[in-house]
Image: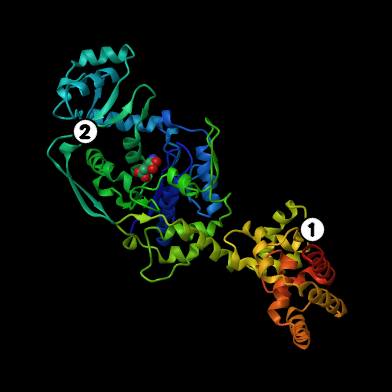
Amino acid sequence: MKQVRVRFAPSPTGPLHIGGVRTALYNYLFSKKHNGKFILRIEDTDTNRFVPGAEAYIIESFNWLGIQFDEGVSFGGNYGPYRQSERKEIYKLYVKELLDKQLAYIAFDTPEELDTKRAEISNFQYDASTRMQMCNALTLSANEVAQRIANGDNYVVRIKIEPNQDIIVHDTIRGEVKINSSVLDDKVLYKSADELPTYHLANIVDDHLMEITHVIRGEEWLPSAPLHVLLYRYFGWEDTMPQFAHLPLLLKPDGNGKLSKRDGDRLGFPVFPLQWTDPKTGDTSAGYRENGYFPEAVVNFLALLGWNNGTEQELFSLDDLVHEFSLDRVSKSGAKFDYEKGKWFNHTYLIHKTDTELASLFMPIVQAKGHAITEAKLTHIVGLLKERAHFVADLWEQAAFFFEAPTQYDDKAVQKRWKETTASMLAELAVFIQSLPNIDDSTHTEETVKQWVETKGYGLGNVMNPLRLALVGELKGPHIFDITAILGKEETIKRIQKAIDTLG
Ligand code: GLU
């Protein structure tokens, strides 16, 4: 079998949408699964839509996600250049070939002339039914065409589509898609104004020259596929035509339709892998990285939006995915973008990290709040709290009371739990804790204190709830004697004293 070669071919028109990331991921998984090559091609022939910084953004995104290319822009390889704007001369040869074979023709119609036609003919389409009324090499004499070109008139090259032919796209996911060529228009393949091909020509020529074996891309490109099939036919490349696989759409979390940036803004989640600042407007859009996602969690989450391995398994490392992935198990129907599920994945990856690793990720946040703590102590703290966090940054909200003594106490809890006898009980407890050699072992402290409460006959709840209020400020947090072990004797007693002074 031929070596599998697939490509991700983004246009640098802005930040990479999360759906594009999934497309790239599926290409990556497919190529690795088959010991193939994964290529990054930058499709920057639409100069009007070019956005500076977008290419670097795309490369950085995959770098962050751990998705590696074998060839392409910034990765090298033997099929370059991989940036289409650097392949101008190559495309010209293929445009000429189609012209020579009379499978394409030159057209001079100006935008104004095209508008006039559109106004004249309803549902105007530049095709076999209209092309003879237009200003092109089929209606002008060879001399006139040569003259216009010599004058420097702008022209385009259009594909000449014969009507009433069946075109069949064989798609791994969708099966056979058959259409009639009459519905297609004579698409522009090349523009003399910038000497650049359009997407369709460049895409086909490059897939051919780069020996691409499978084209795995978003469903939004399915309507272009018949034209692409036709181009392979025109060039005589049917034998090496890549196998198509059009991936299902990512759908809005609620309602119908394609997931858009607006859905993200509306519902408060990112639709881009990295934060992006629009170079023109200065507007910033949130990114998964900056929002605190682990790249492994994002990869795992995206992999399952449109694919599963046929079991209930949800957690997959990148290696697992490579091993398990197959296009046969990609669904035909769109995948609802379940943002809560994305958070769940992050939480799951967070709790699977070692406490030491989490502590080192959390340390800069603690330091930025102006606190110093040993690694060992922070490791202990994150171990107690990680179950409650979706993101490393969430840990601060959970852990803040370890660093900052409460300045106020939850009203409701005070009303319910702080009774008349509470202050004197806690004062006694403070004396008792003071008398203990240390409170480092939470199990031991728990036993000792419980025994003390029992001997006194105060009732466990009457002591423990106010104690928690004194230490945390509210009735939440991990096991109370884990808290005292971390705070230490002195701080514990200080907080009890402060609560007595404040609440009386
Ligand atoms: N340049 C196209 C894009 O931006 C590539 C589509 C394809 O993969 O053929 O997605």
Classify 10 Å Cα crowding around label 2: few (below 14), some (14-19), many (20 and above).
many
Q: Tell which quarter ligand 1 is in.
A: top left
Task: From this view, report whether residue 157 is shown above or below residue 76.
Answer: above
Which residue is found at the position 23% from the left and 28% from the top?
100
Q: Is residue 339 or residue 168 the one in the foreground?
A: 339
Place of residue 63 in the rendered image (x, y in percent of width and height, measured from the top left): 55, 50
Kindly state the secondary structure of the residue where label 1 is placed.
loop
Is residue 199 among the parts visible in the rendering? yes
What residue does disc 1 label? Answer: 372
Q: Secondary structure at mark 2?
A: loop
Quadrant containing the N terminus is bottom left
Does the beta carbon at disc 1 come under 8 Å from ligand 1? no
Name the residue tied to disc 2: 185
The part of the image, by quadrant, that contains residue 450 is bottom right
Say if residue 137 shows up in the picture.
no
Residue found 28% across the figure and 18% down from its top: 112
